[in-house]
Image: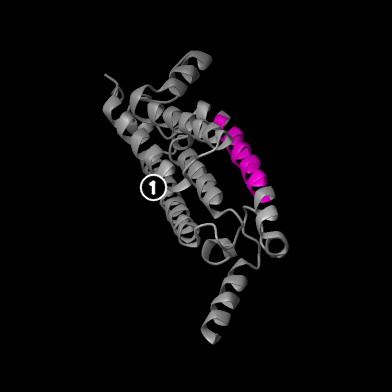
Amino acid sequence: MDSYDYGWWPLVALHVGLVLAFVLGYLRPARPREWRSFGVLGAFFVALYTEMYGFPLTIYLLTALLGRAPFPDPFAHNSGNLIASLLGLGEGWAGLFMFLGGAIIVLAVVIVASSWRRIHDADGKELVTDGPYAVVRHPQYTGLMLGILGALVQWPTLLTLIMAPILVFTYYRLARREERELEKRFADEYAAYRQLTPMLMPGRNAVAQITDKKGSASEG
């Protein structure tokens, strides 16, 4: 008899709660548009962890579409990584993809937390341009998008694949709006920073910029 390793609703609630608590703690939505973006993000993670532990909707949909189970033992939890399962790569590859996705998520958490600490220390009184902000102008959103990528590598589903580009576009728009506010607050200083620093994706000179800034600080 095939395994059925789902229906773990307490794990769904635990993981959704932890992720949303982290995001609320570090991104701290305050305005209506920020709460709307947070709502889309929350829906993404509810969909992700519901399929990871609660109800494997994607596997049911694929079974209905194909008229058969898409791969052997489809409801075993080890089969949940669709990249490995659909390509017939086996449990070892599934574990590798889940580990890789988890590592990307850990990196995303580090980036978001480090970025928030610098913003918190500045307290809105000065423009932050060091650390992660020397690499991209919106490292918190870069970290968030990395986390989305990690989730898709770790446990891809039809719903999260559909929602991911919507979520990325939502936070891209939010970043653009924040930039207009920063331009009004910091004027020429922000214009110069924007000219030198990529928005969300690190440029080729990112490491050199960080090294130069550290060297200048030590000389001073």
- Which secondary structure is most common in the magenta stretch? helix
Q: Is residue 73 above or below residue 199?
A: above
For residue 65, side relative to residue 155 (left or right): right
Could you tell me which residue is drawn at 59 percent across and 62 percent down?
127
Q: Position of residue 20 (x, y in %)?
A: 40, 37
Q: Quadrant of the C terminus?
A: bottom right
Q: Quadrant of residue 4?
A: top left
The colour mode here is: one colour
Could you tell me which residue is drawn at 34 percent across and 24 percent down?
54
Could one spot residue 8 in this view of the protein?
no
Could you tell me which residue is drawn at 51 percent across and 26 percent down?
159
Q: Identify the secondary structure beneath mark 1.
A: helix
- Nearest the viewer among 167 and 32 is 32
What residue range appears in magenta?
163-179
Q: Quadrant of residue 125?
A: bottom right
Q: Position of residue 5 (x, y in %)?
A: 29, 26
Q: Is residue 103 above or below residue 118?
A: above
For residue 30, side relative to residue 179 (left or right): left
Look at the image and say whether residue 164 sits in the magenta stretch.
yes
Which residue bears the numbered disc 1?
Answer: 99
The image shows a total of numbered marks equal to 1
Crowdedness of circle 1 by 10 Å Cα count: few (<14), some, many (20+)? some
Q: Position of residue 196 (x, y in %)?
A: 70, 65
Q: Position of residue 185 (x, y in %)?
A: 66, 55
Q: In the orientation shown, which residue stands out farthest toward the bottom?
A: 219
Could one spot residue 120 in this view of the protein?
yes
- Nearest the viewer among 189 and 71 is 189
Look at the image and say whether residue 78 sits in the magenta stretch.
no
Q: Quadrant of the N terminus?
A: top left
Amino acid at dot 1:
Phe
Q: Is residue 54 above or below residue 103?
A: above
